[in-house]
Image (cartoon, rainbow, N blue to C red):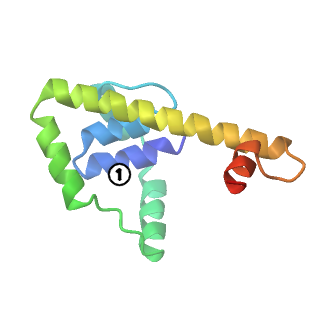
Amino acid sequence: MRAKYGALLAYTKNSSPLAVIIYGHHSGLPCVNELKNRLAEVDRSTYAQIEAAAKADEIDLALPETVQQELAAIAKHPLDCELWLRLLFSCLVDADYLVAIVLCLRQASPTGRSRIETVHLNR
């Protein structure tokens, strides 16, 4: 499961809400304590390889300052944070679902394009 590495990255960047969403988007939202236990089991050598590969490809893994500020502001209000977390989680799950649909339709199409992509291209 690759989500655990993204969750660990978010967690190490002091973003527990993002870590919860990233970790749980295929298996459901874990509570923060459960997430801590699961992240403690992550293979650190693989995680280090992922970080090294990102650095070699010049991919900045830092959270933008604006995101950090927004997360800090949301974290001050537990109910707002819970609502935000669940809405963002829902968006992530919906996006995954839509990508899966497009990939399935693409595989079923003789042209290699999904019907959704064909409609979009013909606009």
Looking at the rendered structure, the kind of residue marked 1 is Leu
State whether residue 37 appears in this view: no
Residue 33, image x and y in percent?
Answer: 27, 27
| Residue at image coords 70%, 44% | 116
Locate residue 31 relative to residue 47 in the image: left or right. Answer: left
Residue extending furthest toward the right: 110
Q: Residue at x 45, y 67 (%)?
A: 54
Q: Which is more toward the observer, 34 or 95?
A: 95
Which one is in front, 10 or 112?
112
Q: Image check: 109 left or right of 94?
A: right
Farthest residue toward the left? 76
- Residue 65 position, x and y percent, is 19, 60
- In the rendered image of this protein, does residue 114 appear above or below residue 30? below
Q: Is residue 1 visible?
A: yes
Is 35 drawn above or below residue 42 in the view shown?
A: above
Instruction: Tell me: residue 81, above or below residue 43.
Output: above
Q: Secondary structure at mark 1?
A: helix
Q: In this picture, is 23 found above or below 43?
A: above
**Image location of residue 101, percent across then percent down:** 68, 37
Identify the residue under disc 1.
9
Say which quadrant the C terminus sits in. bottom right
Asked which quadrant contains residue 11, the reply is top left
Asked which quadrant contains residue 19, the reply is: top left
Disc 1 crowd, CA 10 A, few/some/many (<14, 14-19, 20+): many
